[in-house]
Image (cartoon, rainbow, N blue to C red):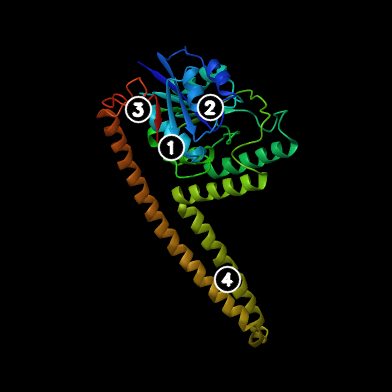
Amino acid sequence: MTTLVVQIPCLNEAESLPAVLGEIPRAVPGVDRVLVLVIDDGSTDGTAQVALAHGADRVVRFPQNRGLAAAFSAGLEAALEMGADVVVNTDGDGQYPADAIPALVRPVLEHRADMVIGDRRPGEVAHFSPLKRLLQRLGNSVVRRVSGTEVSDAASGFRAFSRRAALRLNIVSDYTYTMETLLQASAKDLAIASVPITARAVDRPSRLFRSIPEYLTRVGMGILRIFTMYRPLPVFLRLGALFLGAATLIGLRFLWYWSQGHGGGKVQSLIFAAILTMIAVFTLLLALVADLISTNRRLLEEVLLRLRRADLEGGRKWDGEGAREGAAGRPPVEIR
């Protein structure tokens, strides 16, 4: 039996959630069962109760807001417990079209992709401001270069994941999951695809960030962090080469003046070149250490993958009544 779990991370979405839940298709070609999971990220407007009242099969709730990345990660874990073969992530504000879910999951069902991204074609979206369209184009260009993928909407949260991908993704960010999952999927050789969608305009301001500079700063730091975690050697080797190149140029400058008989007044350049050379050597050594740490991380993630599989196969499953097997009597809204 093929199970599709549609997970919806929510923060104060009681007003829009009924319409979102009502649009989710309960029959999808190639899927035997469609389940809906809502992750309530510390809402104060009764989102969890609204979700249950309007057809959610399972609700996981945080007592306080922990951020989108934590809600997404908890959703993947809960979806795997529900027996998901495919996981679709969508938003509770209604911007993503639920009727595109069959097209989104098709590449996963056909074993052509482990992650499928709903491509809003953000550079062309009419309800995006010109500045946002420009930033989306620039951001996607950076992500494509860093990740080595051809994804044109890296910030889209409308995604489908195979069970294989859901088991392998480990979210370490406390901000957002979109860039991190893409970079991890690339680093772990998971197949990535895109399908075009038409996103709706959402009137309310974003709850993920308060300003564009804040978003760019946090996403940029997140990309650097993840890329350094999984591919540290190129990062530190290039940084070391930069310092070594600067030291070489300054050293050559000193030698030129010295050959002209004016080296005595340029000793500062020689000292500066020596300092940059030492920094370059330390950076190159750091590259080797970081690469060893990255290798250990991959080994630990392989161990974690085996533990997850053993845990799920050993009985940590959802019983269909809002509780895990063997945990009878738990309320339908699970607190984590």
* Left or right, 114 with reference to 243: left
Q: Earlier in the sequence, mark 2 or mark 4?
A: 2
Q: Which residue is mark 3?
A: 81
Q: Which residue is mark 4?
A: 247
Quarter of the image for the C terminus: give it.
Answer: top left
Q: Is residue 194 above or below residue 249?
A: above
Mark 4 packing: few (<14 Cα in 10 Å), some, or many (20+)?
Answer: many
Mark 1 packing: few (<14 Cα in 10 Å), some, or many (20+)?
Answer: few
Q: Quadrant of residue 135?
A: top right
Q: Quadrant of residue 78?
A: top left
* Left or right, 291 with reference to 42: left
Residue 255 visible, this angle: no
Mark 1 vs mark 4, CA separation in Å: 37 Å
Query: Residue 163 placed where, x, y %?
Result: 39, 28
Looking at the rendered structure, the secondary structure element under dot 4 is helix
Mark 2 vs mark 4, CA separation in Å: 50 Å
Q: Earlier in the sequence, mark 3 or mark 1?
A: 3
Q: Earlier in the sequence, mark 3 or mark 4?
A: 3
* Left or right, 86 with reference to 243: left
Q: Is residue 321 above or below residue 266?
A: above
Mark 2 vs mark 3, CA separation in Å: 19 Å
Contact check, label 3 and label 1, Cβ < 8 Å: no
Q: Earlier in the sequence, mark 1 or mark 2?
A: 2
Mark 3 vs mark 4, CA separation in Å: 55 Å
Q: Earlier in the sequence, mark 1 or mark 4?
A: 1
What residue sits 59% from the left and 75% below the top?
251
